[in-house]
Amino acid sequence: MKKLLLALVVMVPFLVASETGWGDKPNKLDPTYQMPVDKFPKFEADIVLKNGKKIRFCCPKSMLHFYFKPHHYPEYNVQNRDQIARLTVRDYLDGKEIDAKKAWYVFGSRLVGPHGDDLIPLASKTRAELFVKRYGGTRIMDFATVEQKGYGLVKFLDL
């Protein structure tokens, strides 16, 4: 009985670490919405920290939530954006990974992400315009505009 209890005490932290993203393995659950990341490959987004740790998200909106308010997630020990090395998103049309700061985002389309309304990332403005013709959209924004809108944009998408 003592051996079983000891084994549980030793193994539980490792099991928790694999789900939350602590340790060497990437997280399986989105830190913002607690949704499985692998279930939504077209929407997956990532943040790579300067220490090399990769944090995976189920959608761009969730990644932006973390980006604007990293201190809300103390388990990742990110105090500010200076600790973030790279942001990546997937182009919705072909699924290729792209730099989130170079992507274009469609706001207000008929397409919804894993957690409701979202910003749909695309590799170029031309691709974003093509996306709008197919799925609708009220605005196309570059990352600088998304940053300017800030956390309020993320909260608006969550309404």
Image (cartoon, grey):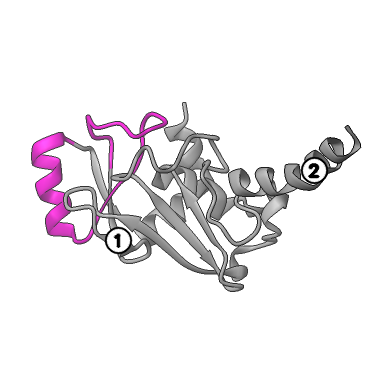
Q: Does residue 68 appear left or right of residue 17 in this picture? A: left
The residue that appears at 9% across and 48% down in the rendered structure is 130
Q: Percent from the top left, x then y, of residue 29?
A: 53, 41
Residue located farthest toward the top when viewing the structure as drawn: 159
Q: Percent from the top left, x then y, of residue 112?
A: 30, 31
Q: Secondary structure at mark 2?
A: helix
Instruction: Identify the image quadrant of the N terminus.
Output: top right
The residue that appears at 65% across and 54% down in the rendered structure is 22
Q: Which residue is mark 2?
A: 7
Nearer the observer, 95 or 10? 10
Please name the amino acid that badge 1 sits on: Glu
> Does the magenta portion include 104?
no
The magenta segment: 107-136
Disc on the earlier residue, 1 or 2: 2
Residue 87, placed above or below residue 22? below
Q: Percent from the top left, x then y, of residue 11?
A: 74, 45
Badge 1, how many Cα within 10 Å: few under 14, some, many 20+? some
Q: Percent from the top left, x then y, of residue 124?
A: 19, 61
The residue that appears at 68% across and 43% down in the rendered structure is 16
Residue 59: quadrant of the picture: top left
- Disc 1 or disc 2, which is closer to the eye? 2
Instruction: Calculate the distance from the C-alpha at mark 1 to the C-alpha at mark 2.
Output: 40 Å
Q: Which residue is mark 1?
A: 97
Nearer the observer, 60 or 133? 60
Q: Does residue 28 appear left or right of residue 140 in this picture? A: right
Q: Secondary structure at mark 1?
A: strand
Please name the amino acid that badge 2 sits on: Ala
